[in-house]
Amino acid sequence: MAVRTDLLPPRYRDPLRVGHGGMGEIFCAVDESLGRSVAIKVLSERFAEDHAVRQRFMREALAAARLSGEPNTVTIFDVGEWNERPFIVMEHLPGGTLDDRIAREGPQPVDRVLRWLEQAAAALDHAHARGVVHRDVKPGNLLLDRDGNVHVADFGIASAAGMDSLTATGTILGTAGYLSPEQAQGQRATSASDLYGLAVVAFELLTGERPFKRESMTAEAAAHANEPVPSASARRRGLPHEVDLVFQKALAKRPEHRYPSARAFVEALEDALRASATDETVAMPVPVPPAPISARPARRWPFVLALLLLGALAGGILAFALTRGGSDHTAAPPDVRTIVKTIQGQATTVTQQVTTTAASPPPPPSPPPSPPPAAGSQSGAALNDAGYNRMKVGDYEGALPLLQQAVQKLQGTGRIEEAYADYNLASTRLHLNQCDGVKDLLKSSERIQGHRSEIDTAKAQEKSQCRGGGD
């Protein structure tokens, strides 16, 4: 297609028109000075005729250029004006846009969606920290490089071109599907508006369609402002119901009710996607894993018990034989005692006969059992065992100090006992409605022992109980 040569400075040769956005025309060209391919966006003529819009476009473009070089942000090489038409020169990304992917493939694999959202979230959070608001987050502004990584383009350009208001007839076609309620009502866009747009993108990547898709842009914008958030799990089989709770918050009508950052939204979505799709309980009991492996050697109780039984049987036979001498025998029967002695680690049964009389005093009572060793002298594995036994009978108050000491002693060992102790302490704190450190304990346990369904369940409860279901 022939390209008007007066639209671009002479240094950009072999221009090829590749698209048309709401703000203007998009070209690929070669930067003759640097010898590299670039993408160039030229402000549409109808906007360029307004001197105020041209100035605002340049101001916003320069602000966006400050973000160049940051991860997952499209790099801007040049901002200028040629023949009263502002233009922006940026890196050329050959992977197309997420809009292209959705149109071609429909819903995307969950792992890929999470990776793309994490990358977009990093770029948006960084821009917001610098005071730059995107105002037009949509799949068409999320570009892919050769390795399939997302880069966010067009920071602030929608506002500069006057596209963040429905009063600009025809300028937001294809964008209304991602407008926040406040933008749809003509209010100023903020970082919370960007987070709303990212949530709409996430919904579309997971389900293949926008949450409020309508026949006209006006109806769709009105739906964003007035209609309840639809269920994503109902639109794609296999999505857990917990995902719907995340989108309820991310797509809240009021900005202050949404997630505080793009990263917080993506983390909540990741937790929800890993939760069971069949468990709809918000606050569920946390199952305790199998008894942890003890670091102590196995005891030889079965062997010793057998010796005791054999000794008791021998003593009984001897007593029976001695008392068969006649029924008129008036002397007290002999007292036969069976004693088990341990000699050089081996249990030996010794039968001992002691003659007693009726006047003999009863034997003194056995001394009370010695108290268990102090917790401070026990190993981390033993403390975990003791805490686990308390948990099994519902004594979480008693388990808490034991497990705290167990975690402290086992921390950094990387042994399976450390994983069990971390999980048991997290579970105990959840049962006691104590949220401090629970998330880190669960992550540590999973890092050591690998993925466990019990840990997934505990994470879901921690999110619901300690973060108010993501609130």
Image: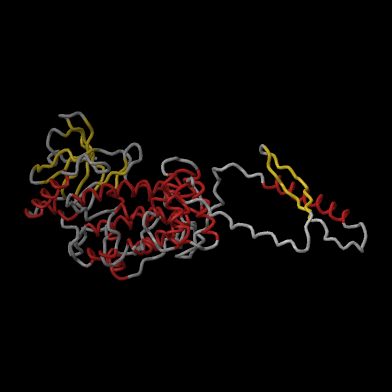
Q: Is residue 96 left or right of residue 363?
A: left
Q: Is residue 273 above or below residue 234?
A: above
Q: Is residue 32 left or right of residue 394?
A: left
Point out residue 431 in the picture as x, y percentages from the top left corner: 45, 62
Q: Is residue 54 above or below residue 36?
A: below
Residue 239 in view, yes or no: no
Quarter the C terminus occupies: bottom left
Q: Residue at x 51, y 59 (%)?
A: 391
Q: Is residue 288 left or right of residue 429?
A: right
Pick the front one: 21 or 130: 130
Pick the front one: 336 or 447: 336
Pick the front one: 446 or 272: 446
Point out residue 139 in the picture as x, y percentages from the top left corner: 31, 51
Q: Residue at x 10, y 52 (%)?
A: 56
Quarter the N terminus occupies: top left
Point out residue 398 in the picture as x, y percentages from the top left corner: 47, 60
Q: Please, which colouring scheme is shown? A: secondary structure
Q: Is residue 467 above or below residue 132?
A: below
